Amino acid sequence: MNKKIAVLSGDGIGPEVTRQAVKVLEIIADLFGHSFSIEEGLVGAVAIDQTGNPFPEETEKVCRSADAILFGAIGHPKYDDDPKAKIRPEQGLLAMRKKLGLFANIRPVSSYDALLPISPLKEEIIKGVDFVVFRELTGGIYFGQPRGRAEDGNSAFDTCTYTKEEIIRVSRLAFEAARNRRKHVTLVDKANVLATSRLWRETVQDLAKDYPEVTLDYMFVDNAAMKIIQNPAFFDVILTENMFGDIITDEASVISGSLGMLPSASVGTTSSLFEPIHGSYPQATGKNIANPFGAILSAAMLLEYSFGLSEESQTVRKAVDKAVQDGFVTEDIQEDNAKGTEEVGDKVVDLIKQNALVNS
Ligand code: IPM
Ligand code: MN
C-alpha cells in the first residue's frame, strides 16, 4: 500500500514523541511491504515564530494532500502566561480542526494491568476498564459566535451553539462504534440547565431509533465526572459535546495510569488526524523523558482507521503492551530504572521486529 502521511510535530515534546511514532510507522512499512511517504508541516508556536501564523496555508495544503495526519502537540508557556497575546498556538489547532472538518474526536480509555499499581484509583475499580469517548470537535462553546470582550472591557462572553446536523454526524459514529462493542452509549450533557444539551438529548434520542440493538442512557456531566472515578467500568461509549469531552477525557486518562499513554483520532469526511492527548508538556521538552506511547498508539490508530491495516495496528499495540509489561517505560510511569523517550521508541521497534520474526 502506498500512502502519504502529513507529520505535524508542533511544540514542546511534540517533535520527540512524534519521532518515535514515525520510526514505528517506518518499520511497519518495511515489514509489511507498504510505502509511507512523509511530508512535514509547521504548526503551533514554532509556526508563529517562523510565519506569524499558527496554522499556515502551506501546512493546510500538506494536510489536504495527505491520506492521514500525524500530530504531536502545540502550546508554549510564553503564550499561556500572556492572556493578552493576540495570536496563540491553540488557535492553530482549532483552525486546523475547523478547516479540515475534523468533527469527531475519538479517545479510547483502557487500563493496563502492569500500570494498575501506579494509578491513583484502586485496582478493583479500574481493572478491565475499556471505554471510548466520542467528543464533538468543531462546534459548541469553542467556536460559537458572538464571542469576545464588551467595549468597556469589563465583561466577556462566549456562545455555545449546536445544530442538529452537527449532533447527528458525530452521534452516528458513536452508535456505529457501539454496535461493534458492548452496545451501550451514554450521552453526557447538562440538559437540566443548557438549551444546547436539550437539543442533543432530543436529537440523539431520535437517532437511537436507527440502532435498536444499542442501549442509550443519559448522564449529566457533573454526575459523569463522578462516575468515571467511582465506576468507570460502567461505560462503553461516551458521546458528548466539545467542552465536556475535553474535560472528561483528561479526567479519564488517569485510569490508564498516565496521561502519556492515551492516543486519539480526530476524523472528518475528508481528513483524519491522530494525536496523543497529552499536550506539549514544556517542562520536559528536549530532555528525552516524555512518554512516547500516546504518540505511538496514535500511529496505531492511524493504521487502522485511515488505512484499514488492522493487523499492522494490532502489531504496534501488542509491542506497546509488551514494553509496558516488561517495565520498559519512561519516568512518568516508573521512576526506578526509567528509560528515555528514544530508548522506549527503539524498544517498540525491536519488539515489532521480533514479533514479525516469530510469525514469519
Ligand atoms: C485537547 C486540548 C485542546 C482542546 C487545546 C490545546 C485547545 O486540550 O485537544 O484536548 O481544548 O481541545
Ligand atoms: Mn484537552
Image (cartoon, rainbow, N blue to C red):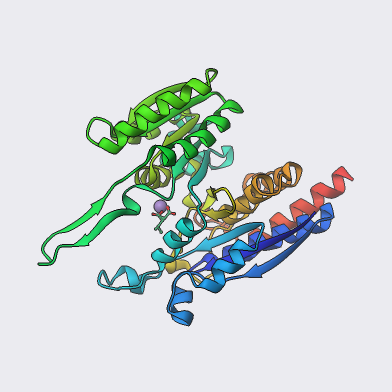
Q: Is residue 145 left or right of residue 138?
A: left
Q: Is residue 250 left or right of residue 276?
A: left
Which residue is found at the position 50% from the left and 53% from the top?
101
Which quadrant is the C terminus positioned in?
Answer: top right
Residue 134 in sight in this render: yes
Which residue is found at the position 43% from the left and 79% from the top?
52
Which residue is found at the position 47% from the left and 35% from the top?
171
The x and y percentages for residue 118 are 48, 44
The x and y percentages for residue 147 are 25, 58
Residue 341 in sight in this render: no
Q: Is residue 227 left or right of residue 180?
A: left
The x and y percentages for residue 89 are 41, 68
Residue 279 is drawn in which quadrant?
bottom left
Which residue is found at the position 25% from the left and 37% from the top?
194
Answer above or below: position of 56 versus 247.
below
Which quadrant is the N terminus positioned in?
Answer: bottom right
Which residue in the rendered view is the most extreme toward the right? 360
